[in-house]
Image: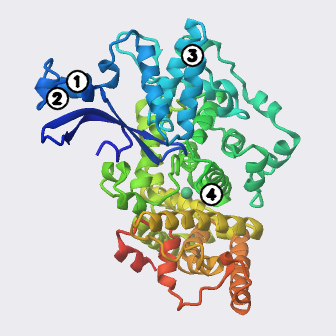
């Protein structure tokens, strides 16, 4: 169980000697994750001192007569405590030597060895710092920052966890460009908060290359090229466009926070998107944010939403996929992932995105964009953000939202089309639906973008799904999206299905309110493009690259559509079918 959770396990492994005697070997299993988050190897070590002893114990108590069973489990079998020599440092090195002697060597083991070797010839204070580094590297939570919490006996913020403190310190001291590349190495981050450089927004703009500045000047245009921004910002587009758009919408003023706090917050949120995901990375968040800003700028929407609504829409867009693992909720449920367990298989990812974003926001005053809000205002904006992030779960809400908005569109929007006064439509209930629709449309806006962007996104999401399917095959898990198989998938066909069954209805309804003719024009042209691609790929046969090869089998639009549902959890088939 511990290993499944990626944690260390320590305890007794029971062996039997030839003589029939039972032998309890104090053992330890350490998960090793050479490639980021997933534990790929387990290193098993056992204390063979037990074998050297003359009398093999036949029970736990004989072997370790001191302490209760509980304390034995916790402490006495620790490899460190079984060593008799000297300081903790030396004991640690000893266990690392053991690790080194194993024939399987993960890259992290080499890192351990290099650091341990460096410790040998270092002055005490350096050796101590390196020991801290080793401690951090041994943690299985390397990529899950847990930030600062106030110590009960002290008013100063105190690091709850050295990893988190260093991460935050590193993030905040670097400004947007170098980001994680230069983490602070000091173990004493808490005392140096006041010394952190505080680049202001003008400084951010100064750091911008001419290319970035030129691109950001177009940040409200529907033709905005977020893929280009991704390239020229070294895969950190969110903080750049986030600052640009949120200042344009006067968010610091609405929230009563300074621009530096906003920039820190954006930097921290962006750092919690996974750059290795081909789709669900911070570029997708930047794209959804840019689309949301575009919607908010439409005349009819402007009339309906107040500044706090605007802030909640932009914030929800920024955080809506934070810490996305690159696998969908169904995969997490099928693998008994701890998030699926935590959220009872219900809107697993969306719940996580919402929770994790608030956790990070409250982790430190320097990132807390809400700290100046009074309790009621904060409660209101929090509720609104959570509602919008949860609304991005396509399997749960799409049906309801589209039909609701359609009805409203039929009842109110059409009537109000000729009337300049939309305010009668802006009831609190309607505003909730409008905000949900806005973020849902923004989340799946790819097919209504200019063609070159639409194509890029279609390949990105397909590749992320392909990877999931490959892993499901490798691990003999249920295949959640069988259509997304790299060897057989037709991307044009998947796009056609997606547009037919989701996008057209959603954007028709949204267009009735927001009036977005430019987008609807792109949708028609892109749809036509995918149709032509599909036709063309039917004619060309085996020479076509796999990604564009038409699937020879009967078309299963319903399935394809279901699979294209970005957040499909696969556990609610009836809803999806109704939706289709
Ligand atoms: Zn998304």
Give the label on residue 119, or none. 3
Quadrant of res 206: top right
Helix, strand or loop for disc 1: loop
Q: Which tag is nearer the camera, tag 2 or tag 4?
A: 2
**Residue located 33% across and 58% down the image:** 345
**Mark 1 touches mark 2? (CB < 8 Å):** yes
Task: Tell which residue pokes out farthest to the right in this image.
Answer: 210
> Which circle's residue, 4 or 1, is located before the other in the chain?
1
Q: Residues within 10 Å of mark 3 (few under 14, many from 20)?
A: many
**Residue located 83% across and 42% down the image:** 213
Ligand 1 image-quadrant field: bottom right
- How far across and how far down the image is residue 491, in percent? 63, 76
Label 4 beta carbon less than 8 Å to ligand 1: no
- How far across and how far down the image is residue 235, in percent? 70, 46
Give the label on residue 53, or none. 1
**Residue located 55% across and 74% down the image:** 485
Q: Which tag is nearer the camera, tag 4 or tag 1?
A: 1
Q: Which residue is mark 4?
A: 278
Above-or-below relation of 96 to 446? above
Label 2 beta carbon less than 8 Å to ligand 1: no
> Which circle's residue, 2 or 4, is located before the other in the chain?
2
Q: Tell whether 240 sits left or right of 305.
A: right
């Amino acid at each position: 169980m511990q290993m499944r959770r990626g944690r260390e396990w320590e305890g007794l492994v029971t062996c039997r000697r030839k003589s029939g005697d039972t032998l309890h070997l104090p053992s330890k299993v350490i998960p090793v994750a050479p490639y980021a988050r997933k534990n790929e190897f387990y290193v098993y070590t056992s204390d063979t001192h037990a074998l050297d002893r003359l009398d093999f114990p036949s029970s736990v108590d004989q072997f370790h007569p001191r302490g209760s069973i509980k304390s034995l489990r916790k402490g006495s079998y620790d490899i460190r405590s079984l060593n008799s020599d000297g300081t903790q440092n030396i004991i640690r090195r000893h266990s690392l030597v053991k690790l080194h002697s194993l024939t399987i060597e993960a890259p992290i083991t080499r890192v351990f060895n290099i650091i341990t070797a460096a410790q040998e010839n270092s002055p005490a204070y350096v050796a101590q710092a390196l020991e801290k580094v080793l401690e951090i590297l041994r943690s299985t939570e390397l990529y899950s920052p847990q930030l600062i919490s106030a110590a009960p006996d002290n008013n100063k913020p105190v690091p709850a966890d050295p990893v988190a403190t260093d991460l935050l310190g590193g993030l905040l001291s670097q400004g947007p460009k170098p980001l994680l590349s230069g983490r602070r190495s000091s173990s004493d981050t808490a005392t140096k908060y006041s010394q952190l450089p505080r680049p202001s927004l003008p400084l951010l703009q100064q750091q911008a290359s001419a290319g970035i500045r030129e691109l950001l000047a177009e940040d409200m245009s529907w033709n905005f090229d977020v893929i280009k921004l991704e390239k020229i910002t070294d895969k950190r587009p969110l903080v750049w466009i986030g600052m640009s758009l949120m200042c344009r919408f006067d968010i610091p003023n609405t929230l009563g926070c300074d621009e530096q706090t906003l920039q820190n917050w954006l930097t921290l949120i962006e750092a919690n998107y996974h750059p290795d995901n081909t789709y669900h990375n911070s570029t997708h968040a930047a794209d959804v944010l840019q689309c949301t800003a575009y919607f908010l700028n439409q005349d009819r929407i402007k009339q309906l939403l107040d500044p706090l609504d605007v802030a909640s829409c932009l914030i929800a867009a920024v955080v809506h996929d934070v810490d996305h693992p690159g696998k969908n909720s169904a995969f997490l449920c099928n693998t008994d992932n701890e998030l699926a367990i935590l959220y009872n298989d219900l809107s697993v990812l969306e719940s996580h995105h919402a929770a994790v974003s608030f956790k990070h926001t409250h982790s430190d005053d320097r990132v807390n964009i809400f700290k100046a809000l009074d309790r009621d205002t904060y409660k209101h904006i929090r509720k609104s953000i959570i509602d919008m992030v949860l609304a991005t779960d396509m399997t749960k809400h799409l049906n309801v939202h589209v039909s609701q908005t359609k009805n409203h569109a039929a009842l109110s929007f059409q009537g109000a089309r000729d009337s300049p006064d939309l305010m009668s439509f802006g009831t609190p209930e309607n505003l909730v639906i409008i905000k949900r629709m806005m973020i849902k449309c923004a989340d799946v806006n790819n097919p209504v973008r200019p063609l070159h962007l639409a194509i890029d996104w279609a390949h990105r999401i397909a590749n992320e799904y392909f990877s999931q399917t490959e892993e499901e095959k490798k691990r003999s898990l249920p295949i959640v999206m069988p259509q997304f198989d790299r060897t057989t998938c037709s991307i044009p066909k998947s796009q056609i299905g997606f547009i037919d069954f989701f996008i057209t209805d959603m954007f028709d309804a949204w267009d009735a309110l927001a009036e977005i003719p430019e987008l609807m024009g792109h949708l028609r042209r892109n749809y036509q493009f995918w149709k032509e691609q599909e036709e063309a790929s039917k004619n060309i046969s085996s020479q076509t690259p796999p990604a564009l090869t038409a699937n020879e089998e009967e078309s299963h639009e319903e399935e394809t559509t279901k699979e294209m549902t970005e957040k499909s959890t696969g556990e609610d088939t009836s809803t999806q079918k109704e939706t289709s």
